[in-house]
Image: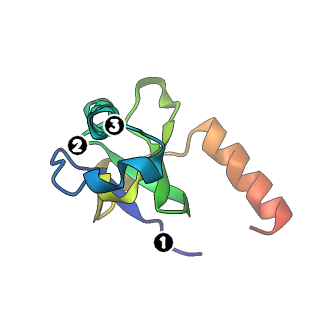
Amino acid sequence: MKESEFYQVISDLSRVPLRDHMMHGFEERQDFFNSVRQLRDRWKDRIGECINRRNGFVLLRFHDTPGGMADEAWLPDYLVLPVSKPAYLETREPTPQEQTEAEIDKAFGF
């Protein structure tokens, strides 16, 4: 089985392609910057497991939430950097949701 990739959401916004604001559906560069800043403020410094990637975005599952229910978010590549697997996941038991997903993946051959 392939080892999972992990990414940390960065605080630095210098990698944001502000000149491409229209390609992201924004008419004004400032609106695009504000939107990216809100994403950064919501997820910054958290480490997530990459469970999918598409068109310059990664779907990250964040396991550091209370109650064992993981958060998921699609984030652009320029807001994340690859990191090693966090220590708190090394000895953690899978949640019931993760066990169910693993069983379904196994049943369908993923």
> Does residue 19 appear in this view?
yes
Q: Which residue is mark 1?
A: 3
State the image quarter where residue 20 is shown: bottom left
* Residue 75 vertical placement versus 57 (above, below): above
In the rendered image, the residue lying farthest to the bottom is: 1
Question: Residue 75: x percent and y percent?
Answer: 42, 48
Q: Quadrant of the C terminus?
A: bottom right
Q: Which residue is mark 2?
A: 45
Q: Which residue is mark 3?
A: 28
The amino acid pointed to by label 2 is: Asp
For label 1, the crowd category at 10 Å Cα-Cα, with few meaning under 14, some 14 to 19 and many 20 or more, is few
In the rendered image, the residue lying farthest to the top is: 67
- The scheme the figure's colours follow is rainbow
> Does residue 86 appear in this view?
no
Q: CA distance from mark 2 to mark 1?
A: 22 Å
Question: Residue 109: x percent and y percent?
Answer: 80, 69
Residue positioned 79% across, 53% down in the render: 104
The amino acid pointed to by label 1 is: Glu
Q: Quadrant of the N terminus?
A: bottom right
Question: Residue 101: x percent and y percent?
Answer: 70, 48
For label 3, the crowd category at 10 Å Cα-Cα, with few meaning under 14, some 14 to 19 and many 20 or more, is few
